[in-house]
């Protein structure tokens, strides 16, 4: 393991305290796997892509700690973040006679992580689980904070639970095999932390974008560490999203509408969030909260990261219908995470007319 890029970020919530380990080669590092919940059995949940690349390494790392280790491969992709995949986890656990101490390991991106977490939250009313995120998006966001879910055809992440992992192990070396489009999708969630919480981090991302796109290990380590620090602080203050945590959904009201409206998997989650952040920043400017130049600055960075900044063609009424399902909507009124001043965000209602204006401006004629 490269000691230079190894670090630990603590997460402390009412639902659990745990560490995020970030380092180069952690899958092959014995200390990363010590001190986990003890059990006779463990189940590694993954998909064919990730299991083929990293399943054996994780199984070998866990072998000293669990007498029986199974590996389950769920179908790959956002379109499979559903009941059918969840049932496959439960079917496997029950068929193998797994008891309530069995530890689940989520090896993969946010799709595997969200589903494995939900299975862990509900199997026998709760078994321990460990996040082993292998996408940039999962390392900087989805593996941390205990949101677990599956999609419903009518809305993203509509069925789920808050359930914290026992540990998060981010092996930066796994990012080497990530397709470029997935790397860019992860950068969307990295960029997100700048405008909502840390302007100095936004400056740093702008300056280091070429290094991040080139997968410079030190730059990725810094991006993952700072993102996890910000996320740990926010979920530590508001685990169940009664207030502050909602800022982490910057761009997501528009983004989830894109994902649901186009069909799960048509755009990657990070792509939809990237475009959603452009729209949310435009809306902040439209409502007079931030200068239009700040929204343009963000749009330039998002485009430079290789993410879409042109909204997909969808009728205005369809946008509104999709966004009314959003968990932040209240009494049919749309609410968005808006930038109140550069580096600070809050949830605010916005008139439909203003929302439709910013969408129209970012939709190719
Ligand atoms: P994903 O899980 O679909 O992974 C992206 C693709 O990369 C998949 O095809 C996967 O097989 C592949 N892959 C994963 N690791 C790889 C590796 N190291 N090398 C090569 N290929 C690899 O997508 P994602 O972007 O990681 O996650 C998106 C999901 O996360 C969405 O469902 C979103 O709703 C969810 N999410 C949840 C939270 C949360 O707080 N729980 C936060 C953000 C996003
Ligand atoms: N990704 C949003 C959250 O964890 O709250």
Image (cartoon, grey):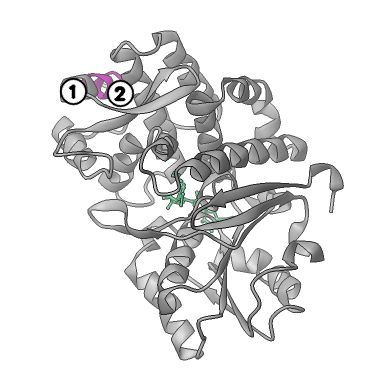
Q: Residues within 10 Å of mark 2 (few under 14, many from 20)?
A: few
Q: Is residue 150 visible?
A: no
**Residue under numbered circle 2:** 364
**Residue under numbered circle 1:** 351
Q: Residues within 10 Å of mark 1 (few under 14, many from 20)?
A: few
Local SS, label 2:
loop
Q: Is mark 2 within 8 Å of ligand 1?
A: no
Q: Position of residue 58 (x, y in %)?
A: 69, 69
Q: Nearer the viewer, residue 299 or 96?
A: 96
Q: Is residue 34 above or below residue 209?
A: below
Q: Is residue 359 magenta?
A: yes
Numbered-mark total = 2
Read off the magenta span: 357-361
Quarter of the view holding residue 317:
top left
Q: Which mark is residue 4?
A: none
Rendered-image quadrant of the N terminus: bottom right
Q: Is residue 350 visible?
A: yes
Residue shown at 42%/16% (left/top)?
295
């Amino acid at each position: 393991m490269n000691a230079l890029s190894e670090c630990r970020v603590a997460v402390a919530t009412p639902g659990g305290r745990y560490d995020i380990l970030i380092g180069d080669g952690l899958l092959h590092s014995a200390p990363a796997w010590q001190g986990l919940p003890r059990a006779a059995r463990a189940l590694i949940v993954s998909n064919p892509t990730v299991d083929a690349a990293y399943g054996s390494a994780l199984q070998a790392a866990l072998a000293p700690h669990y007498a029986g280790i199974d590996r389950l491969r769920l179908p790959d992709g956002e379109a499979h973040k559903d009941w059918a995949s969840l049932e496959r986890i439960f079917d496997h656990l029950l068929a193998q006679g797994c008891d309530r101490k069995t530890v689940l390991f989520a090896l993969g991106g946010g799709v595997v992580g969200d589903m494995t977490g939900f299975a862990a939250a509900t199997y026998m009313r709760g078994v321990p689980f460990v996040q082993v995120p292998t996408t940039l998006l999962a390392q900087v966001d989805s593996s941390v904070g205990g949101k677990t879910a599956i999609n419903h055809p009518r809305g993203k992440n509509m069925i789920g639970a808050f359930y914290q992992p026992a540990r998060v192990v981010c092996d930066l070396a796994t990012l080497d095999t990530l397709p470029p489009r997935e790397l860019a999708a992860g950068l969307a969630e990295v960029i997100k932390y700048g405008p909502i919480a840390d302007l100095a981090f936004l400056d740093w991302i702008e300056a280091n974008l070429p290094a991040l796109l080139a997968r410079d290990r030190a730059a990725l380590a810094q991006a993952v560490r700072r993102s996890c620090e910000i996320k740990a602080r926010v979920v530590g203050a508001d685990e169940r999203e009664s207030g502050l945590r909602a800022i982490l959904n910057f761009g997501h009201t528009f983004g989830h509408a894109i994902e649901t409206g186009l069909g799960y998997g048509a755009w990657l989650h990070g792509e939809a969030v990237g475009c959603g952040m452009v729209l949310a920043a435009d809306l902040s400017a439209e409502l007079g909260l931030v200068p239009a130049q700040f929204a343009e600055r963000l749009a330039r960075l998002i485009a430079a990261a290789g993410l879409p900044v042109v909204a997909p063609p969808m009728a205005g009424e369809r946008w509104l219908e999709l966004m009314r399902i959003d968990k932040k909507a209240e009494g049919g009124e749309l609410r968005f995470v808006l930038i109140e001043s550069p580096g600070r965000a809050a949830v605010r209602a916005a008139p439909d007319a203003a929302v439709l204006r910013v969408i129209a401006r970012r939709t190719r004629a």
